[in-house]
Image (spheres, rainbow, N blue to C red):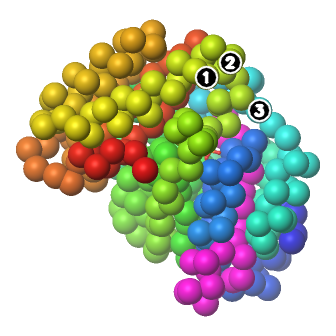
Amino acid sequence: MDVITTRKDLARWRAASRPSVFVPTMGALHEGHLSLMRLANRAADERRLHPGCVVSIFVNPSQFNEQADFDRYPRDLERDIALCEQQGASLVLAPGVEEVYPPGVEIATPPLPRVAWEPKLEDAARPGHFAGVCRVLMRLFQLVQPAAAVFGEKDWQQLQVARALSDQEHLGVEIIGAPIVRDADGLALSSRNARLSAEERLRALGLHRALDAASGASTPSEAEHVMHDILRGIHAEIAYCVVRDSRTLLPANAGPYRALIACRIGTVHLLDNAPWPEGPS
Ligand code: AMP
């Protein structure tokens, strides 16, 4: 497995390689990320692309709307590199900020796809977040030039934004969604879970419980009420808990639907979602 930190070395690697399957991450890798790599490796194999996958580890400053969240974000590059190697990745790209956004070089933010701003979900809870995500994705896609990229369903809106961006900008990158990986008790894995105290982690189980309970509701609005009640019960600061069209994320009268939750427990922003009315897996 190669580890590359500069654009120059990446260009050299690319010239000697077939188009790849790409897994963008912010590091602090956990089993959720590793499952994305395994899916990417299989996708590369099936599509006869470069064997293994390309994993980027880059904590993107422009997608954090709170400096404190960026500063507190966990980082452990050596451990991450070892985990990528164990999963059979072919390349880890771990660039510094100045490689992704070189001083003096204008890196444009693409027009935001509708699904990034219209639903008033993550876009409302974290203003500027998807502008930062789209900007870094365009840049990383430009650097890596992958044939396909894998994104977790955990960040459901981000997955739809990545799809829309690839279509809109004619990037030709196939966007592949990967199922949510959960702890045995149902909590969706997240690098941010490390910041939950034991008591907060127990409360955080309410997200999964809310999605589960909502799956039994007979209408989207009843499902939203059920989720609200459970989230209020765990004293979560609710950003949204809704049932929406699974692709546009707008309110809808016909399925397929997705139930989506975002809330803050303590200082930690948590997300979860599930197909509705099926409930979380
Ligand atoms: P992050 O490092 O948080 O930016 O996440 C990198 C990728 O891993 C994104 O596509 C996430 O959706 C995905 N991911 C994070 N947590 C999980 C999880 N528990 N299950 C599946 N994918 C995940």
The span picked out in magenta is 41-61
- The Cα atoms of the two marked residues, 3 and 1, are separated by 17 Å
> x and y percent of residue 217 in the render?
19, 35
Q: Secondary structure at mark 2?
A: helix
- Residue corresponding to mark 3: 74
Residue 184 has which mark? none
Q: Is residue 66 visible?
A: no
Q: Is residue 106 magenta?
A: no
Mark in front: 2 vs 3: 2
Residue matched to label 2? 198
Residue pushed farthest bottom?
A: 48
The residue at the point 78 percent across, 71 percent down is: 88
Q: Position of residue 12 (x, y in %)?
A: 82, 76
Query: Eyeballing the image, is 228 above or below 73?
Result: above
**Res 201 label:** 1
| Left or right of 249, for residue 51 | right
One can see residue 272 in this view: yes
Residue 72, picture quadrant: top right
C-alpha span from label 2 to label 3: 18 Å
Task: Give the mark nearest the N terminus, 3 or 1.
Answer: 3
Q: Nearer the viewer, residue 14 or 59?
A: 59
Q: Position of residue 178 (x, y in %)?
A: 51, 60
Q: CA distance from mark 1 to mark 2?
A: 5 Å
Other residues around mark 3 within 10 Å, as few (<14) / some (14–19) / many (≥20): some
Q: Position of residue 230 (x, y in %)?
A: 35, 19
Q: Is residue 238 left or right of residue 9?
A: left
Q: Identity of the amino acid at label 2?
A: Ala
Amino acid type, callout 3: Pro
**Direction from residue 231 to residue 132 in the image, left or right:** right
Which one is in front in this view, the residue at disc 3 or the one at disc 1? 1
Secondary element under disc 3, as helix, strand or loop, is loop
Report if the CB atoms under discs 1 and 2 are less than 8 Å apart.
yes
